[in-house]
Image (cartoon, rainbow, N blue to C red):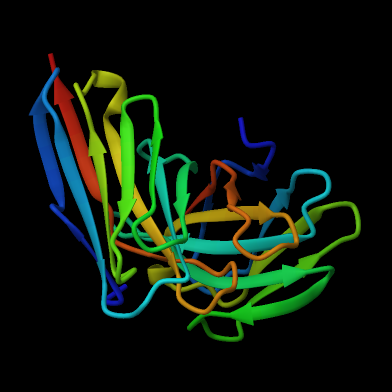
């Protein structure tokens, strides 16, 4: 969807390196969701952000929502091969639970 | 494991045919959403059902239709299949509260030849 832009489209990093994926919206977000997808499989929920300036962490993954609620970043510390996959941000623009997704960022982590 | 199961996992159909995809949601999840994901793209919202009624629809033609049943199962029906309907179809269920995360199944890979 053009409403949500993700960058980069793909990322190849060496194991142990840190990385950041960005998700930018042209409109204010009521909620921003991060999912991970293995190729050809369903989406696994990672985190949800609602408040401007909010930050959440789970294991080595941290997600932030900026103050204006139009951009989010996903940061992985000390990446591992298990982090490989497609990361998708999904946005709720109307305070509903109908999500619009970005096109995804494909992450590869090599030993 | 999200508790959302979809069947079949793979399906091959011919252009012009009709197809029914099935989804079993988590118990207690009254909302089910269907998404279409083309290769290399993010999921596109098809429609959502809440307590057996359609509750929002994306930019998909009427030949895409759905049903939701009281036992937390649901169906996606597509008539007059076109080649561009080839995609991964994902079902997602959620609680009936705003900002409740969607829990996705593993999808059905549909190929239209």
**Residue B113 visible:** no
Q: Where does the image place residue A3, in percent across and percent down from the top left?
A: 30, 76
* B35 displayed left or right of A3: right
Query: Across the whole image, how many numbered discs are drawn on residues?
Result: 0
Q: Is residue A67 above or below residue A83?
A: below
Q: Is residue A22 above or below residue B56?
A: above
Q: Quadrant of residue A110?
A: top left
Q: Residue at x 31, y 26 (%)?
A: A60
Of all residues shown, which one is farthest toward the right? Answer: B70
Name the foreground residue: A62 vs B38. A62
Which quarter of the figure is the C terminus of chain A placed in?
Answer: top left
Q: Quadrant of residue A33?
A: bottom left
Q: Residue at x 40, y 49 (%)?
A: A34
Q: Is residue A69 above or below residue A65?
A: below
Q: Where does the image place residue B49, in percent across and percent down from the top left?
A: 72, 70
**Residue A95 visible:** yes
Name the foreground residue: A98 vs B52. A98
Q: Residue at x 18, y 31 (%)?
A: A108
Name the foreground residue: A3 vs A48. A48
* B51 displayed left or right of B47: right
Q: Where does the image place residue B75, in percent across and percent down from the top left?
A: 72, 61
Name the foreground residue: A68 vs B79. A68
Q: Where does the image place residue B17, in percent across and percent down from the top left?
A: 59, 69
Q: Residue at x 54, y 54 (%)?
A: B90
Q: Quadrant of residue B86?
A: bottom left
Which quarter of the figure is the N terminus of chain A placed in?
Answer: bottom left
* B45 displayed left or right of B55: left
């Amino acid at each position: 969807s053009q409403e949500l832009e993700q960058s980069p489209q793909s990322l190849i990093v060496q194991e142990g390196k840190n990385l950041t994926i960005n998700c930018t919206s042209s409109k204010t977000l009521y909620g921003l969701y991060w999912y991970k997808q293995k190729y050809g499989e369903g989406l696994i929920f990672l985190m949800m952000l609602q408040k401007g300036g909010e930050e959440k962490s789970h294991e080595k993954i941290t997600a932030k929502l900026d103050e204006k609620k139009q951009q989010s970043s996903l940061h992985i510390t000390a990446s591992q091969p298990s982090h490989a996959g497609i990361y998708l941000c999904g946005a709720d623009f109307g305070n509903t639970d109908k999500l619009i997704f970005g096109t995804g960022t494909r992450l590869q982590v090599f030993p | 494991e999200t508790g959302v199961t979809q069947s079949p996992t793979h399906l091959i159909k011919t252009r012009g045919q009709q197809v029914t995809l099935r989804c079993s949601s988590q118990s207690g999840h009254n909302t089910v959403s269907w998404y279409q994901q083309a290769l290399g793209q993010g999921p596109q919202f098809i429609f959502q059902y809440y307590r057996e009624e359609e509750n929002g629809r994306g930019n998909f033609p009427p030949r895409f239709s759905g049903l939701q049943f009281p036992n937390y199962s649901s169906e996606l029906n597509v008539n007059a299949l076109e080649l561009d309907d080839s995609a991964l179809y994902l079902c997602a269920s959620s609680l009936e509260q705003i900002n409740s995360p969607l829990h996705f199944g593993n999808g059905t890979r549909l190929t239209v030849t």
